[in-house]
Image: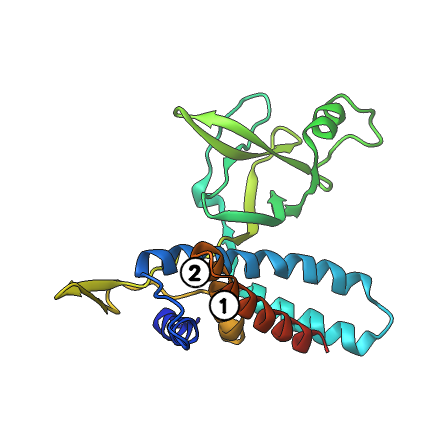
């Protein structure tokens, strides 16, 4: 967790170092959520790159372990208590949670499923005996569907008599907010209304630099944007050494 007030105060100090401009709480909250999602999404690109860079096993293991530690915060699992049967044709349909970002694993009757595209899922229904899904080798597919007039993402499985046992996934970071109340036209921090960043504590510095860069772009201040960009680049370069 990263305290949102700590980040805001650091951003304000850097932005106002030379009387360059004030960032309102509303603006900060917008930039903060954008910065958090940028960092979160970068985890998956970095993890993919780490898996490909296998030349140095020690370095790979260090990077992989570090990214796993940062992503573990967002791991979640839904079990059978949230079943929603949607179709007698496919059976076992299950509405995915709203906060889902990326599926890690799908289980049907406590067996790991191969996750297929919609086309491959349709094709395999009429496949020959040798490749047809079985209880020991189930398959799953994620598609968009309308449930109660709301568009949702649904998991369905084959064989059709099976049900989704659980879905393990990475959830999206919750929306952050610098909570405040107004006193004599001045916004004062209110911890009871605040929502902190869910990111790993090591991301505090990068959050500051990213928000500073976004604030500079929003205020059309190239000096702030370039300053934030430069600090962010130095931080990234240091992390990759």
Q: Please rate how many residues cluster around mark 1, counting C-alpha atoms within 10 Å: few if below 14, some from 14 to 19, many from 20.
A: many
Q: Which of the marked residues, 1 or 2, is nearer the chain's N terminus? A: 2
Q: Residue 89: give x, y in percent of width and height.
A: 59, 21
Which corner quadrant holds the C terminus? bottom right
- Dot 1: element: helix
Residue hosting label 2: 32
Residue at (58%, 70%) from the top-left corner?
Answer: 232
Question: What is the spatial separation of the Cα atoms under label 1 and label 2, in whole angstroms?
Answer: 7 Å
Which residue is nearer to you in this view: 20 or 26? Answer: 20
Residue 26, visible in the rendered structure: yes
Res. 117 mark: none
Residue hosting label 1: 207
Above or below 145: residue 172: below
Q: Residue 156: give x, y in percent of width and height.
A: 59, 33
Which residue is nearer to you in this view: 120 or 108? Answer: 120
Residue at (54%, 34%) from the top-left corner?
Answer: 154
Above or below 187: residue 9: below
Residue at (76%, 21%) from the top-left corner?
Answer: 126
Which corner quadrant holds the N terminus? bottom left
Q: Residue 120: give x, y in percent of width and height.
A: 74, 29
Q: Please rate how many residues cluster around mark 2, counting C-alpha atoms within 10 Å: few if below 14, some from 14 to 19, many from 20.
A: many
- Dot 2: element: helix
In the picture, measured across the screen, residue 217 lies left or right of residue 5, that is right
Q: Are marks 1 and 2 in contact (CB under 8 Å)?
A: yes
Residue at the right extreme of this rendering: 55
- Name the quadrant containing residue 163: top right
Q: Residue 40: give x, y in percent of width and height.
A: 56, 59
In the picture, measured across the screen, residue 77 lies left or right of residue 126, that is left
Residue 199, visible in the rendered structure: no
- Name the quadrant containing residue 82: top left
Which residue is nearer to you in this view: 216 or 7? Answer: 216
């Amino acid at each position: 967790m990263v305290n949102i007030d700590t980040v805001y105060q650091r951003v304000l100090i850097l932005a106002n170092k030379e009387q360059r401009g004030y960032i309102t709480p509303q603006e900060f909250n917008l930039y903060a959520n954008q910065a958090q999602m940028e960092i979160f999404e970068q985890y998956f690109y970095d993890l993919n790159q780490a898996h490909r860079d296998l030349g140095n096993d020690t370095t790979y293991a260090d990077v992989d372990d570090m990214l796993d530690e940062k992503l573990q915060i967002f791991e979640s699992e839904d079990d059978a208590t949230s079943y929603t049967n949607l179709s007698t044709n496919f059976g076992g349909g299950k509405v995915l949670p709203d906060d889902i970002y990326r599926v890690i694993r799908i289980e049907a009757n406590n067996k790991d499923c191969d996750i297929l595209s919609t086309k491959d899922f349709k094709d395999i229904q009429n496949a020959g005996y040798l490749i047809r899904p079985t209880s020991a080798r189930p398959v799953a597919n994620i598609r968009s569907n309308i449930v109660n007039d709301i568009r949702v993402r649904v998991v369905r499985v084959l064989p059709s008599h099976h049900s989704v046992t659980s879905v393990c996934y990475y959830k999206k970071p919750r929306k952050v907010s610098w909570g405040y109340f107004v006193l004599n036209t001045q916004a004062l921090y209110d911890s009871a209304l605040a929502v902190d960043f869910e990111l790993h504590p090591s991301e505090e510095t990068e959050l500051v630099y990213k928000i500073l860069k976004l604030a500079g772009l929003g205020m059309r201040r190239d000096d702030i944007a370039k300053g934030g960009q430069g600090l962010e680049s130095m931080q990234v370069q240091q992390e990759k050494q």
